[in-house]
Amino acid sequence: MEHEMIWEVPGVFVREGVVVALPLCFPGQTISPPAGETAIATLAFDANATTIYCGTKGTRAHVLTSMIYEDRGVVIDVGAVPDATSVDGLCVCENRIFIVASGKNGAALWSVAEFDFDHSYSLIQEWDLGREPYEKVCDLFSEHSVAQAIPVSDGCAMIGIVESSGEVFRVDLKSKQKDILGKVDKSGHFSRALVLDRSGRLWGSSGLAQLWVCDVSRGEVECTDMEAPAAAGRSPHTQVSAWALDPFTGILYGGTTPDGYLFKFDPESRELVPLGKPTIHGSISCMSVGNDGRLFGMSGAEDDIAHMFSYDPRSGALSDMGIPVSSLTVREYGYHFSCAATGPNGEIFFGQGERINHLWVYFPSVPRRVPVRE
Amino acid sequence: MKSDDLKTARFYPFEHEPVPDSCWSMITGPDGRVYASSCCEMTPGGSVSIVRYNDDTDSLDTVVNVAKVVGEALDSGKGTQCKIHYSFASSPNNDILYAATHLSAPGLGRRYYHAWADYKDQDRAFPHSVVLAYDTGREEVLWHSVFIPREGCRCMALDPDRGKLYAISYPRDHFWIFDIGTREIRDLGRLGSVNSQGIFTDRKGRVFTTNGSGQLVRYLPDEDRLEELPIYLPHHSSVTSWHTVIYDVVASPDGDCVYGIPWDSNPHLFRYWPDDGRYGCMENLGPVHQERDVTHPVAFLLDHCGGLVFGADGMLYYATSRWNSGDELRMNWEFPIDTEGVVVQMNTETLEKRDFARLQEPTQRCHYVSRAARDSLGNLFFGQVPRPIPAGISRLQMDAKGENLHLPIRTWG
């Protein structure tokens, strides 16, 4: 007897919570920057956490800004960063956005005025929105690119890693002083993903998937003997490709490439616990911890079809949530994501990293109450 | 609904096992004969064959069994090379017909295959599409090659002068360039989420397709650059440009412009002049279908127009579907309704249209035409996706006079 074909199986796409993709423009009024210039590489919030900034990479690099609340709901192009093909880090400090950006002439620190969404009367009735010019703060490296840079805890400096050399550097946003704090791996085998723990220490991976830590205040890089989990025999291929900090507990989560394992790490006790592999994909590309402590992330390399996953530390549940797809705004699939950040209401922003892109927002489900057993 | 005094096309069913369920592509070969793809898109382990109409025997010959040629094990359990979608391309410079394959059928023994969910599954996934070069003079496959890794080829165009094949991949909707000389393929990145069903070139070798927003995307070979143009395909006022991707497109006989039809609801015929101004000029030539209840989304299976071809008489022909008004509300995969396939003739000078021929079979609904072609005798052929199966092609005798009436040939699928 022939079996009937099954044509549809629910759950291929994310159906827990809601995913929306925001076009990188003021819908109906502007168009996105050109394709090939909008892969979102980094995200940062302003002090109120209501305005998000996106740094892109491609044939040119842009800073984009967005507010999704009230009558805003737009993405505005702050402009193409001069001489840059990648924005490697963003920091909002004292009403200015500081940008670490790299191009064919090396890396530099730029700044531009914070975008004032509150200034405009309305983004439904009528509006006035200006674009401010970029100002170069200082050159960082004349012949090297920066892989990633993140704000330090007090927000007045940025710390990062040089793409080619693995040198860890710090640049003060006011004094413009740049210091090389150390080098993470002499052989050049290191991850470009970085995270600051609650104590202000910088973490990354290098060598055979080993974690390194930089005490920013002392300017020392320590290569530890703690290893990120890897498939048996594959630690030489493995690096941490994504990090997320739980700001409430101080726990760090790490995701690896190329095999896509997840782990949690206590930077105080230095206890590392493998959590498993959330999806069939290799390469966890980005993650962020939501307001209730659940971790949300994306897995999949540039040639994959991304899967979203979640980890609930209370139950230990690790779930493949499905392929991200948007239908309430634009109708699009999301195939590769590079960065993630948590908004003030627990929504998770994901930066898409392809040729054509959107700013994705995931609104997690709110679990039903369950009766308390007597 | 019924149209009287029209010519009637004759249907030629495909005769392969497993029974083919679709003909997704058709083209005139460099030899002036018409080739079509006999596809098994819904049969586990199904494979595609290339067939050709034989004027002498008034029947179809199977000229390529793709699985045999490329050495594919149809019982591997992986998604098979089950169809050639809009991916034929004929060379005007030699006898070569290029063809690229596409996915959808599950592997043998499987009941389910999802292009997104099963992507990269090492046991089930479609491993890659293949491209082959069929010599229509020697009647043999000269070579074949791995084409797009892990994805099918939705549509394809040839640049015979640069020796390049341009393709759109499914499911990830990327733009690819294949070098015929080196057999290397390059990915230029993503276009959107809804595949264009058509891709074409102009006389400068520029390549045109659409993204899922109905926006023209142009590739400039001299600059190796893709760009989204501020030009959108026309659409009915009840819909937006979303999903208004190219379905079928044909060059005018003089090559100055193209005529096309989108893959959207209540599609509008368009004419595009690629050399007119910086971005070209798009004209809306109006709807091809009947009025309907616009508060309900009509199935594309019903609301379909395709098979654009110029006759030897210089008229544009296309196949369109008709149905009883109101039936569009009841149409779904399970519930077939009465339909009629009609070939419309359009005078592109005056834009006057008239019904020209019927596509019908006693036991099949033959309104869904994928592609069309004109052979060296000037007769027209239409690739059919009928229900119930088998699939096949329809031939319309045109009684044209002259030789080599198939020229100029089409270099895209």
Image: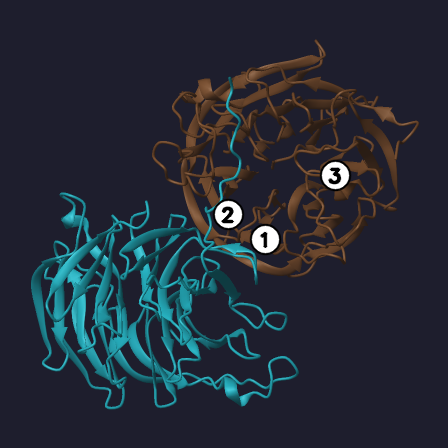
Chain colours: A cyan, B brown
| Residue at 43% across, 65% down | A366
Question: Cα distance, mark 1 to mark 2?
Answer: 9 Å
Relative to A47, residue B259 above or below: above
Question: Cα distance, mark 1 to mark 3?
Answer: 28 Å
| Three-letter code for the amino acid on which mark 3 is drawn | Pro
Secondary structure under badge 2? loop
Identify the mark nearer the N-term, 3 or 2.
Answer: 2
User: Crowding at label 3, few (<14), some or many (≥20) Cα neighbours within 10 Å?
Assistant: some
| Three-letter code for the amino acid on which mark 1 is drawn | Gly
Instruction: Residue B136: give x, y in percent of width and height.
Output: 57, 20
Question: Cα distance, mark 3 to mark 2?
Answer: 30 Å
Lateral position of residue A227 relative to residue B132, left or right: left
Q: Nearer the viewer, residue B206 or B237?
A: B237
Tags 1 and 2 both on a single chain:
yes
Is mark 1 in CB contact (under 8 Å) with mark 2? yes
Q: Nearer the viewer, residue A79 or B184?
A: A79
Q: Chain of mark 2?
A: B
Q: Nearer the viewer, residue A8 or A96?
A: A8
Residue position marked by numbered label 3 in the rendering:
B253
Instruction: Residue B122: give x, y in percent of width and height.
Output: 34, 35
Is mark 1 in CB contact (under 8 Å) with mark 3? no
Q: Quadrant where the C terminus of chain A lies?
A: bottom left
Residue position marked by numbered label 2 in the rendering:
B173
Residue position marked by numbered label 1 in the rendering:
B212
Tags 3 and 2 both on a single chain:
yes
